[in-house]
Amino acid sequence: MRDLPSGPQLESLARELEGKGIDGLPPKERAAAAAMIERCRTIARREAAAGEAALAPIRAALASLYSGDPSGHLAQLAAEIRSSALDAPGERRDRALALLRALTLQKLRESNRRFLTAHGYDPEAR
């Protein structure tokens, strides 16, 4: 549900980069590598802090629209959007729009709470 690579994958990448040793790199490359390591770790920490429970309402909304393996629900939604299946007004489109709004707000809660506040949203509201 979250963007790829996942938090654990980013943490692994940070360890891998550190393991290769960045101290011997030229100053600009060392600074860029250090910044990338820090970004990877920051994203991993945010995702871990939010936990999987934060995505439960979105998973439930997807399950209300699609059956079968839950790991494919988001791909099913994307396919419907691409095929224009949700363009016509109606309950299904309204539910999909609500789901997309909820997913976007959750991503912003995790990554950019200041954006929400600056645009009149309460970052704590669900």
Image (cartoon, rainbow, N blue to C red):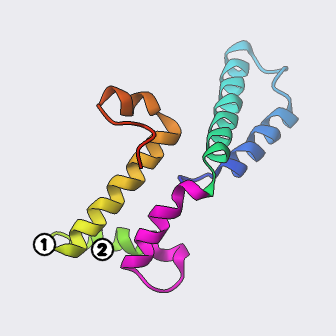
Q: Residue furthest front?
A: 125
- In the figure, is residue 42 to the left or right of 123? right
Give how far apart the Cα atoms at labels 2 and 1 are. 12 Å
Q: Which span is picked out in magenta?
A: 53-74
Amino acid at pointer 2: Glu
Amino acid at pointer 1: Ala
Q: Residues within 10 Å of mark 1 (few under 14, many from 20)?
A: few
Query: Looking at the picture, does residue 45 appear above or below residue 62?
Result: above
Q: Residues within 10 Å of mark 2 (few under 14, many from 20)?
A: some
Which residue is located at x 47 percent, y 46 percent? Answer: 107
Q: Nearer the viewer, residue 59 or 40?
A: 59
The residue at which mark 2 appears reads as 80
Which mark, by number, is residue 88? 1
Q: Main secondary structure of the magenta part?
A: helix
Query: In the image, is residue 37 part of the stretch drawn in magenta?
Result: no
* Residue 120 at least partly seen: yes
Residue 60, x across and y down, in percent = 46, 70
> Which mark is in front, 2 or 1?
1
Residue 67, x across and y down, in percent = 44, 85
Which residue is located at x 75 percent, y 16 percent? Answer: 26
Q: Disc 2 on helix, strand or loop?
A: helix
Q: Disc 1 on helix, strand or loop?
A: loop
Picture quadrant where residue 87 is located: bottom left
Residue 120, x across and y down, in percent = 29, 31
Which residue is located at x 12 percent, y 70 percent? Answer: 89
Query: Looking at the picture, does residue 91 appear above or below residue 5?
Result: below
Residue 123, x across and y down, in percent = 43, 37
